[in-house]
């Protein structure tokens, strides 16, 4: 069994005692001798002992990995938590040994274990060691994931430059998520100087790969004339492309274009339809906008009960404009903050003081006209994405995929 190294970089830049070259990829053997991965590979052809001290070599990483998979599957099927934990702990020991020999699949399963606390306490630092090891092997998924760790400071000190470097490496390999993250670096000057043209270039490359977040961000660039000449029709097309892929942000943006007649004909019923469609997908801003449509009878039949319900819901979900709306109502209505009030009363109030509300409406108009903002898809807590395609790529067995996905 190879001893799991604390930090792979410790072994780097030392000389391999067998081939006498500087080790770029080292393995620490159970006897604690460190040799390079390719020498270990060659040694296996001749026998199974360390040439320096005659101790046993670690098992082959593929064998270790397969055994770990079997243990993991057994652990996940077991109803006995104690047994399951001990099986996972043993699986981790095997995976650590395989990862120490440069086995990528093991590194990714270990990242999941350390991030989710499977068979081990949660350990973000150890997860980062695995991210680093896989990223160093040139895996774009790992370069992207490690970049997220550096961006949010998860298990490692925050470092925007390093995040941008890693995303650059992954971008060159065509990783769409990394291209979007890197575009944000150039857009906001995080770890990179502000460069709107480079932002657009990266977004185009990601959107060509079907990345909906990139399509929306590109649409925004054309609306704001950031890095490109203003072009509302083109922006509308980008939103439309992303909306076809059922992206709720994009559907909401289409609603915004139809409501304003921006890049397309002004079409209030179509706008309301888009807002309703996006709100069904759980989009908070669309919920607020649909609420306003109902309050005003824009594109739908005026319905204050429905409108108020939606605005209340958006406020509850933390939408700032909806909260402002409800607070104004509370003030007019003399309701203590936090106290409930009857929607029916509110509707009557709304009709009674319509002129007053009209003044507030002007504020709402302004709010509705602003280009809505939406977060880019970077997650706050990076996790390796274990898509089936990706697992096949790194050679994970099907059972292990299933057990990993149900982590
Ligand atoms: Zn060597
Ligand atoms: Zn030895």
Image: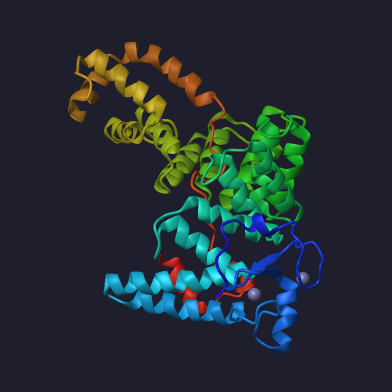
Quarter of the figure with residue 272: top left
Taking depth in this image into account, of 293 and 209 the one nearest to the observer is: 209
Left or right of 221, for residue 352: left
Position in image of residue 328 (x %, y %): 31, 17
Q: Residue at x 43, y 73 (%)?
A: 90
Q: Residue at x 66, y 68 (%)?
A: 27
* The quarter of the picture showing ligand 2: bottom right
Taking depth in this image into account, of 71 and 97 the one nearest to the observer is: 97
* Residue that sits furthest to the front in the current view: 53
Position above or below: 365 against 226: above
Position above or below: 346 against 241: above
Position in image of residue 290 (x %, y %): 41, 35
Position above or below: 107 against 252: below
Quarter of the figure with residue 203: top right
Q: Which quadrant is home to the N terminus? A: bottom right
Position in image of residue 106 (x %, y %): 56, 69
Colour logic = rainbow
Position in image of residue 97 (x %, y %): 56, 71
Total numbered labels: 0
Q: Residue at x 45, y 46 (%)?
A: 277
Q: Residue at x 52, y 42 (%)?
A: 249
Taking depth in this image into account, of 241 and 189 the one nearest to the observer is: 189
Taking depth in this image into account, of 223 and 167 the one nearest to the observer is: 167
Q: Which quadrant is home to the C terminus? A: bottom left
């Amino acid at each position: 069994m190879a001893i799991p190294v604390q930090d792979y970089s410790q072994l780097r830049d030392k000389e391999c005692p067998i081939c006498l070259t500087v080790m770029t990829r080292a393995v620490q053997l159970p006897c604690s001798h460190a040799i390079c991965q390719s020498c270990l590979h060659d040694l296996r052809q001749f026998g199974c002992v360390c040439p320096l001290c005659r101790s046993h070599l670690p098992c082959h990483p593929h064998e270790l990995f397969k055994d770990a998979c079997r243990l993991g599957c057994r652990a996940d099927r077991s109803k006995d938590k104690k047994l399951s934990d001990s099986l996972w702990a043993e699986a981790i020991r095997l995976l650590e040994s395989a990862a120490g020999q440069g086995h990528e699949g093991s590194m990714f399963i270990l990242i999941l274990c350390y991030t989710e606390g499977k068979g081990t306490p949660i350990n973000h630092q150890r997860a980062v060691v695995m991210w680093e090891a896989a990223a160093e092997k040139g895996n774009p998924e790992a370069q992207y994931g490690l970049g997220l760790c550096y961006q949010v400071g998860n298990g490692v000190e925050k470092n925007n430059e390093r995040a941008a470097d890693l995303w650059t490496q992954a971008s060159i390999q065509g990783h769409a998520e990394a291209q979007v993250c890197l575009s944000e670096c150039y857009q906001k000057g995080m770890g990179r100087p502000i460069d709107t043209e480079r932002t657009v270039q990266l977004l185009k490359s990601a959107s060509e790969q079907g990345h909906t977040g990139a399509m929306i961000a590109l649409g925004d660039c054309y609306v704001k004339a950031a890095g490109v000449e203003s072009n509302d029709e083109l922006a509308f097309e980008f939103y439309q492309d992303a909306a076809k892929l059922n992206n709720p942000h994009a559907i909401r943006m289409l609603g915004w274009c139809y409501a304003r007649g921006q890049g397309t004909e002004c079409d209030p019923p179509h706008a309301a339809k888009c807002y309703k469609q996006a709100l069904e997908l759980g989009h908070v801003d669309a919920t607020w906008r649909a609420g306003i449509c109902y309050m005003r009878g824009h594109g739908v039949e005026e319905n204050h009960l429905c409108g108020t319900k939606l605005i209340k819901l958006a406020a509850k979900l933390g939408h700032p404009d909806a909260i402002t709306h409800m607070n104004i109502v509370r003030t007019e209505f003399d309701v203590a903050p936090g106290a409930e009030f009857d929607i029916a009363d509110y509707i009557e109030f709304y009709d009674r003081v319509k002129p007053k509300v009209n003044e507030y409406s002007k504020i709402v108009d302004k709010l509705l006209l602003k280009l809505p903002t939406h977060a880019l898809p970077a997650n706050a807590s990076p996790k390796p994405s274990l898509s089936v395609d990706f697992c096949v790529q790194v050679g994970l067995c099907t059972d292990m995929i299933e057990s990993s996905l149900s982590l």
